[in-house]
Amino acid sequence: MDPTKFGVSSIPLNHAPYGPITDDKLKGLNQGKVALVTGGARGIGRAISGKLALSGANIAILDLLEHELAESKVLGESFGVKVKTYVVDVTDVDGLRAVLKRVEEDLGPIDILVNNAGVSPGKPQWMESFEDFWRTIEINFKSAMVTTWALLPKLRERKSGVIINIASRAATVDFPFAVGYNSSKAAVARATSTLQEEIELDGLGDGIQMYALHPGGVPTAMSKSEVRMDLLEKYPSLTQHGTDFQALFKDPPELCGATCAYLAAGKAKELRGLYWDCRQDIERVVRYGRERLMKEGKYVLKIDFVEGYKNEP
């Protein structure tokens, strides 16, 4: 990843929970709701589960890592809520659907869905089989659509609920060794905005919100494995920008987790359907106003042309 392809904010970004998303402000915001988190056994997923539990939601945590799931369960229960864990491969459609039914039997109707499960092998195309590439697509994108297809009709019936799809800055910029990751995260962002468009057409936007959330640069096990020294030796130009790749990952997972709890409570409906970077001041952007955000095309994936050309229908 070449940081020079990204901009530099003139307003400082947040690298820890701040203002409206500190623990004292989150307590009770989602009291009594039921939240489901995929990939919740460790890292970002565990932090999301923990903050949702802090906010009062009962939690269903899905993952393949059984031992780590138990640790996430202990964290969630420390906030006095019900926590259920389910070992499942999110690429197994029938298995995932079966777990969703079990969650509703165990905890009740799901109000909050966070599609967090994700992988990034960090290999160039020529080192990766098609099957490995496609598994990345299935974990990062297909699984999110399976859960969405199962739950969104029920949210429509109740006219309420929140779906948060964990995206990435990778959805917005091209960089090598991540064709599956980049493609899947762009697909997540586009699917989120498209589905919200349909929700708006039916006049349900005030009750049902979807978000594509960039979790920040979190030093997870996945991010630590993304750069291989043998590849840097083969492609020395990747280091010419003079930036330590790992230094870009400086955000705690709790920042994303707290943002999820805040969004799940319907506190930032103006951002529904959009791509959101959790490091930005959410109240500042909400004050910008949804009408203005939509009119100016902010926080959406788009393409620009040279002067004189527009993206005509």
Image (tube, grey):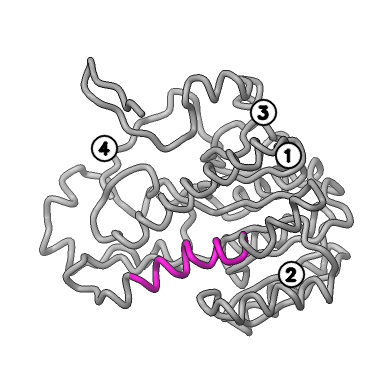
Q: Are marks 4 and 2 in contact (CB under 8 Å)?
A: no
Q: Please tell me which residue is depicted at 18% across the width and 52% down the height of the picture.
A: 238
What's the residue at 64%, 82% (across, down)? 87
Question: Disc 4 versus disc 2: distance between alpha carbons?
Answer: 39 Å
Residues marked 1 and 3 touching at CB (< 8 Å): no
Residue 120 in picture, x, y percent from top left: 38, 65
Label 3 residue SS: helix
* Whole-number angstrom distance, CA of label 2 to CA of label 3: 29 Å
Main SS of the magenta part reads helix
Residue at mark 3: 283
The magenta region covers: 134-148
Query: Which badge, 1 or 2, comes first in the chain's sequence?
Result: 2
Q: Which mark is residue 204?
A: 1
- Amino acid marked by disc 1: Leu
Amino acid of disc 3: Glu
Residue at horizontal 31%, vertical 77%?
A: 131
Gap in angstroms between the C-alphas marked 3 and 4: 28 Å
Q: Is residue 257 above or below residue 209?
A: below
User: Which secondary structure, mark 4?
Assistant: helix
Crowd band around label 1 with a 10 angstrom C-alpha radius: few (<14), some (14–19), many (20+) = some
In which image quadrant can residue 41 be found? bottom right
Measured in 3D between alpha carbons, the distance from the residue under mark 1 to the one under mark 2, in whole angstroms, is 25 Å
In this figure, which residue is indicated by the disc labeled 4?
Answer: 4
Which residue is at the front of the view, 264 or 281? Answer: 264
Q: Position of residue 186 (x, y in %)?
A: 41, 50
